[in-house]
Image (cartoon, rainbow, N blue to C red):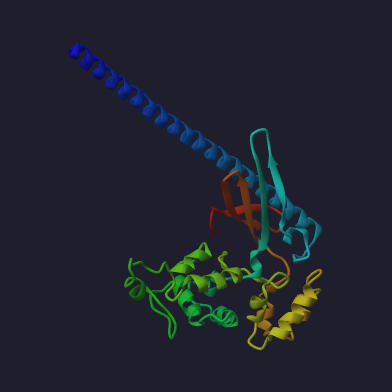
């Protein structure tokens, strides 16, 4: 009888262990299944959000084509310069929102203009960038350091400059590219650049093909003041008030008495480069999409740079 009791006890313990094991496996399978479902839904939402961002880009491209057909100037009073309205994304399985903004990049200082076609520093552009930094209360030495970053030679500029001997001493070490930059985030690698300084600079600078001119109809206040050392904050306020509704009536007449003649030649009232930012929110998935659009003289608009998450 004692033997049968022991056998029954062993059988009971075995049964309990089997039930516990099955319960544990069931819980693990349920957890893994839930994770797979969540991962699949997130991937689906991401794909849907990406397609929605591309759709917004296509719409903005047509908007820019129509704008060129309707107007021969670009200013902040036009429809394209307004924030994109919050638009719903709705289907049988997906609900979300989309919003964004379109900015004229020629209202900013083009970093690649710091050097000419031969890779030599352009002194007039360098002086303007120094003035821009001063207006923004940023160390003007960064102008020379930025010029060294993209000029063709390997010699540090004087008195402000930095080349490989500086950067190879960092941890980790790296080298100056001595080429045009494709995005302003590359400037985060400059000697003396920190996040707070970059955040101050970012709204006023861009990285476009060399040779672009500044659209004074959309230029930031700091960029306008950097055009000439004699321009005061009061002058800039008057200029911004004058252009508010429909831009400047005549750029040459307005600026000829305010800046040097060679500067007037670099000012325009139209633009070819725009930056689109689109934010798509679907459930817990959020997508931030950036696209730089180039508009040709005949109205053709093409994306020349795309990125997700950061410019």
Apparent side of residue 70 relative to residue 210 in the rendered image (left or right): right
Decide if residue 298 is in sight here.
no
Quadrant into which the C terminus falls:
bottom right
Of residue 76 and residue 72, the one placed in the foreground of this image is: 76
Of residue 77 and residue 120, the one placed in the foreground of this image is: 77
Q: At which x and y percent is residue 191?
A: 42, 75
Residue at left 18%, top 14%? 2
Residue at left 35%, top 26%? 20
Apparent side of residue 114 relative to residue 63 in the rendered image (left or right): left
**Which residue lies most toward the front here?**
1
Please, is residue 182 above or below residue 62 in the view? below
Kindly indicate the quadrant of the structure image that contains residue 208: bottom right
Of residue 177 and residue 205, the one placed in the foreground of this image is: 205
Apparent side of residue 117 relative to residue 236 in the rendered image (left or right): left
Residue at left 54%, top 53%? 307
Please, is residue 244 above or below residue 141 in the view? above
Q: At which x and y percent is residue 205?
A: 58, 70
Quadrant into which the N terminus falls:
top left
Q: At which x and y percent is residue 222?
A: 64, 77
Residue at left 68%, top 42%? 89
């Amino acid at each position: 009888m004692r033997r049968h009791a022991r056998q029954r006890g062993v059988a009971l313990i075995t049964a309990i262990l089997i039930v516990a094991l099955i319960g544990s496996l069931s819980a693990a399978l349920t957890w893994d299944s839930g994770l797979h479902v969540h991962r699949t839904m997130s991937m689906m939402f991401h794909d849907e959000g990406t397609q929605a961002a591309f759709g917004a880009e296509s719409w903005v491209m047509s908007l820019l084509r129509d704008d060129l057909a309707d107007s021969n100037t670009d200013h902040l009073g036009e429809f394209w310069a307004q924030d994109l309205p919050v638009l719903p994304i709705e289907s049988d399985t997906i609900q979300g929102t989309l919003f964004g903004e379109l900015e004229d990049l020629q209202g900013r200082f083009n970093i690649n203009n710091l050097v000419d076609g031969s890779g030599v520093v352009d002194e007039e552009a360098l002086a303007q960038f120094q003035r821009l930094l001063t207006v923004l209360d940023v160390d003007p030495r960064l102008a020379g350091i930025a010029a060294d970053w993209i000029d063709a030679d390997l010699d540090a500029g004087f008195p402000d400059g930095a080349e490989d001997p500086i950067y190879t001493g960092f941890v980790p070490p790296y080298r100056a590219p001595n080429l045009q930059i494709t995005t302003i985030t590359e400037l985060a690698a400059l000697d003396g650049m920190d996040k707070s300084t970059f955040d101050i600079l970012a709204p006023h600078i861009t990285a476009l093909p060399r040779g672009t001119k500044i659209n004074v109809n959309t230029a930031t206040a700091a960029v306008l003041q950097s055009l000439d050392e004699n321009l005061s904050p009061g002058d800039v306020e008057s200029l911004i008030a004058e252009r508010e509704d429909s831009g400047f009536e005549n750029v040459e007449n307005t600026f000829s008495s305010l800046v040097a003649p060679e500067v007037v030649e670099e000012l325009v009232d139209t633009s070819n480069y725009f930056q689109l930012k689109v934010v798509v929110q679907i459930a817990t998935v959020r997508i931030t999409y950036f696209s730089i659009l180039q508009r040709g003289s005949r109205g053709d608009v093409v994306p020349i740079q795309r990125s997700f998450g950061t410019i």
